[in-house]
Amino acid sequence: MSGPPREDGDEFADYVRARQEQLVRAAYLVCGDVTLADDVTQDAFGALLGQWRRLRDEDPDTFVRRRLYRAAMLRRVGRSDGTGAGPGLPPELAALTRRQRALAVLLRYEERGEVEAAEVLGLSRASLRRQLPPVTRDVLVDAASLVPDRDYVDRARLAAGRRRRRAWRGWAGSVAAGLVLVAAVVALPDGAGRTVVPRPTATPSASGSVGATSAWDGSTFALLGTLAQVGPSEEQLARLPSVDDLTRGQLALSEVLSFGPRTRMRTLSEIGASSAPVRAVLLRHESDGFRAVLVRPTLDDPFVLVDTLPLVANVDEAGRVTAPLEVTAVAEDRRHVVFLQPGRVVVLDAYTGELRTHPVADRHLDQAGWTPTSVIAWSDTARWRVDRVTGQVHRLSLSSFPGPQRITVEGGENVRISTFDDKGSNMATRGGPGVLSDVWGSTFTGPGGRLATGGFLGRDAALAANQRRPERLFQGVLALPGTEGGADGVADGGAPRLLIAPLSEGVSVGCCEVLGWAYRDEVLVRWRTTELLSWNATTGALLRVATLPGRDGSAPGTPAATVALAP
């Protein structure tokens, strides 16, 4: 869970740089498009990084070539003639199918043997020989010379991180060693307006007897330059105090951000024009996909069904299903909401009900966020900026981000904080505490430039934390102080803080998720799926805010798990 050690990262970098020039040229010869070749090369190295410990001493070459060649043969760039050949390929190559070019590239450009080529492409040797076209190596070498040199080490690490985050967003949640996290379903409405609250169950003590649940201990301890604390167990959640009425009114969040299949909802068409702000967005399962549900507490009926926008699930390049709603879907004006669909970005104006659809040349969109001037949406292989005024769509570099800041981990356990401008371009990068091996979910920027995200503890941090509190501590939430200093010159927010989830060893992802900031100090955290907590990143105090939808069930009328809160 703590990621590869630093020496592994150096070894991986050496491997990539020894092969990147040849492989990106091979990808171009197969697909005929420089941009697509660049994308599939990055993706192949990113996939390899995720398996590096296992494959480095076995056969990484076959693995990375299999990924690269098959993606180059299958992934499209918008052509309708079936070859996918772009400008620059000589006629004798452009006339071939991608499979024929792949055979020629493996055997004559890369000079691989028939056994290896057959394994990479999944063909028999007899089939390979029958389909090999009469193309010379000189033709292939001349065509490949058009491809510019690129360094894929850092880009492979970004791609590997995106793959892990996608697994989390899809609620992969695989469980090891018999550890099962049971989502607590608390205070769900039953359609008749009543609220059903299950009683807390007693838990076995260390001796096996059943006793009372202990209260949460929020004490802190020093951990590699941060102040760390262990968060509440599932049994301790029910004993946390709730936010007071004044705070709840200011947050504009009810005690239950969920609904039942018979919960009364007016539709957006019925309401018509309304300036009621959107405080949250959920999804409701339908027989043909999803409908969005806007939470607008200032209306008599806070749940508003967006009946004008049928939604389907998204599917990424690896075939994984993701929701059409991201946790960063609501703009700061609490009026506009973005939804992702295959090949298009849809923006809803909740005040007028207007829908604006922006086609993009990407059917695998799975993330999006807002800047003051645009929406930035992306998949594993491409990023796009949609201008909020003109609606024009521009393709961006893979390093672009909706910002304003983002926490990443590079080279094992090096936390980095990047700053972005209004168009998503990186302006500066600084270091952070070396306590994480990877991050997931979105980075949220709060008042004074404070930051928060979810992540896996690094190897050293996990060892130190479990020596102090042996509760299988391997993931949690990191909050960092802002860049704006106070009167005493101390950065806003003081020391970095960690809220670590107990019993998170062996769990792939999903113990906790940052959903935003409330006020100056409060981070809104989704804890154990169904609890929305307010974590004070200065004092460490935890309060219950609301009950969220669980992950179980997809019957029509029931809520999906994804929740987006307004900034």
Image (tube, grey):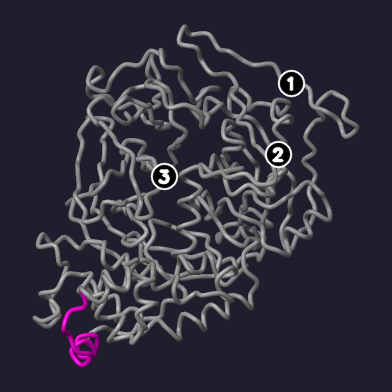
> Comparing marks 1 and 2, which lies closer to the viewer?
1
Magenta residues (range): 131-145
| Residue type at numbered disc 3 | Thr
| Residue 135 within the segment the image draws in magenta | yes
Residue holding disc 3? 328
How crowded is the residue under tag 3: few (<14 C-alpha within 10 Å), some, or many (20+)? many
- Residue 369 visible within the image: no
Residue shown at 31% from the left, 16% from the top: 266
Q: x and y percent of residue 412 in the render?
A: 60, 69
> Measured along the vertical axis of the image, is residue 544 above or below residue 106?
above
Q: Earlier in the sequence, mark 2 or mark 3?
A: 3
Q: Which mark is residue 201?
A: 1
| Residue type at numbered disc 2 | Ala
> Comparing marks 3 and 1, which lies closer to the viewer?
1
Q: Earlier in the sequence, mark 3 or mark 1?
A: 1
Residue holding disc 2? 541
Q: Quadrant of residue 18?
A: bottom left
Question: Is disc 1 placed on a helix, strand or loop?
Answer: loop
